[in-house]
Amino acid sequence: MKRNMICIGCPMGCELTVDVEDGKAAAVSGNNCGVGKKYAETEISAPTRIVTTTALTESGIPVPVKTCSGIPKDKIFDVIAAIKSVKITLPVSVGDVIIENVCETGAAVAVTKSCTQ
Ligand code: SF4
C-alpha cells in the first residue's frame, strides 16, 4: 500500500510517498533530507504531535501552554482534557511545567508565555 503525506519538518513541505508493508514504512521517496524519511517512518508506525493550547488560571485567564515533546496522536483529546482540568496559579514564566508526564505519555506540559496577572 502507498501513502502520500507532506513532510512538516521545514517550510519546503516535501511531498512524500511511503510504501507501507506490515504497518511499517518499507520505503520513502520524495524527501529531500533524512528528516523527511524519519518523519514518514514515525507517521506510519507511531504518529506523534506537539499539543499547543491554553490552560486557565484560577481567575479564568488563559495561559498558552504546550507539550514539551510529541505525544501519541490518539492521546491528543485526553491530553487536552488533562490540561483543561488544571488551574494555574499566577505568576508563571516561560518553561514552567504545569503537568509532568501528562496522561502517562512521558511528556511534560509547560507554559509558553509568561503571565503575571
Ligand atoms: S524532507 Fe527535509 S527538506 Fe523536505 S520538508 Fe522534510 S525536512 Fe524539509
Image: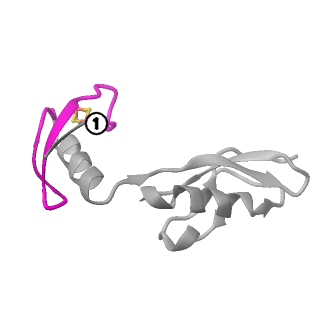
What is the three-letter code of the residue carrying label 1?
Answer: Cys
Element class at badge 1: loop
- Give the left or right position of residue 73, taking residue 99 as reference: left
- The residue at the far right in this view is 59
Q: Residue 113, located in which quarter of the rendered image?
A: top right
Residue 84: x percent and y percent? 72, 57
Q: Is residue 33 magenta?
A: no
* Residue name at image x 71 percent, y 52 percent: 93
* Residue name at image x 58 percent, y 62 percent: 78
* Residue name at image x 31 percent, y 38 percent: 9
Is residue 97 visible to us here?
no
Residue 81: x percent and y percent? 66, 60
Callout 1: few (<14), some (14-19), or many (20+) C-alpha neighbours within 10 Å? many
- The residue at the far front in this view is 1
Q: Is mark 1 within 8 Å of ligand 1?
A: yes
Classify 89 as above or below 37.
below
Classify 101 as above or below 94.
below
Front residue of 35/74: it is 74
Q: Is residue 27 magenta?
A: yes
Front residue of 9/23: it is 23
- Give the left or right position of residue 73, taking residue 77 as reference: left
- The residue at the far top in this view is 12
Residue 54: x percent and y percent? 69, 47
User: In this picture, which residue range is highlighted in magenta?
Assistant: 7-32
Residue 90: x percent and y percent? 84, 56
- Give the left or right position of residue 90, taking residue 22 as reference: right
- The quarter of the image that holds ligand 1 is top left
Is residue 67 visible to us here?
yes
Q: Residue 109, located in which quarter of the rendered image?
A: bottom right
Q: What residue is shown with label 1?
A: 7
* Residue name at image x 26 percent, y 47 percent: 39
- Give the left or right position of residue 76, taking residue 116 as reference: left
